[in-house]
Image (tube, rainbow, N blue to C red):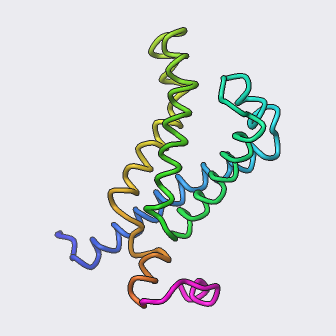
Amino acid sequence: MPMSPQNSQRRLSLGILFVRILVGWVFLSEGVQKLLFPAALGAGRFLKIGIPAPAFTGPFVGAVEIVCGALLIVGLFTILATVPLFIDIAVAIATTKVPMLLKHGFWAAMHEARTDFCMLIGIIAIALLGAGALSLDERWRRTGEAPSPDTQTRL
């Protein structure tokens, strides 16, 4: 039984929404943890892996992950939010997974990198597909007015 174009569009919109929530939630959660547990996940970890100025970059990256992750979840400035997150995950892979690949081999690195690669692919998918119909970006585009707290409740 063929799927109607309307049903197909609805499924695509829901799929994009779920990818945005998945990717946004992981980044938001990791950003919060960088601020809550700086020694293990923020500045301390950045110092350990050789990121310059870890006292600044740890909290900065945490804040970027929180803000951009939240923007992905609600679908606001979505394409813009993918740029710093792409840079974030590319640096994470280069500074943690590539050294692991060289030291411990392919399978150990692939095991440890599974979330990073999923986030990378998710970010690329969002950048290519856009925010989708179930987003504040789309609401803004349709109405021609900037999203406000009032428009968020009508979504």
Depth check, front residue: 42 or 131: 42
Residue at the far left: name it.
2
- Residue depicted at x 52% and y 39%: 89
Whether residue 9 is in magenta: the answer is: no
Residue 36, image x and y in percent? 82, 46
Give the vertical position of 123 relative to 145 (above or below): above
Which region is colored magenta? 144-155
Q: Quadrant of residue 33?
A: top right
Residue 152, image x and y in percent? 59, 83
Count how many numbered circles sit on residues in the image. Answer: 0
- Residue depicted at x 21% and y 76%: 4
Residue 20, image x and y in percent? 49, 60
Give the vertical position of 1 relative to 48 (above or below): below
Residue 101, image x and y in percent? 49, 15
Depth check, front residue: 125 or 51: 51
- Residue depicted at x 38% and y 87%: 142
- Residue depicted at x 63% and y 51%: 65
Q: Left or right: where does residue 55 sit relative to residue 11? A: right
Depth check, front residue: 29 or 56: 56
Residue at the far front: name it.
53
Q: Quadrant of the N terminus?
A: bottom left
Q: Left or right: where does residue 94 sit relative to residue 152? A: left
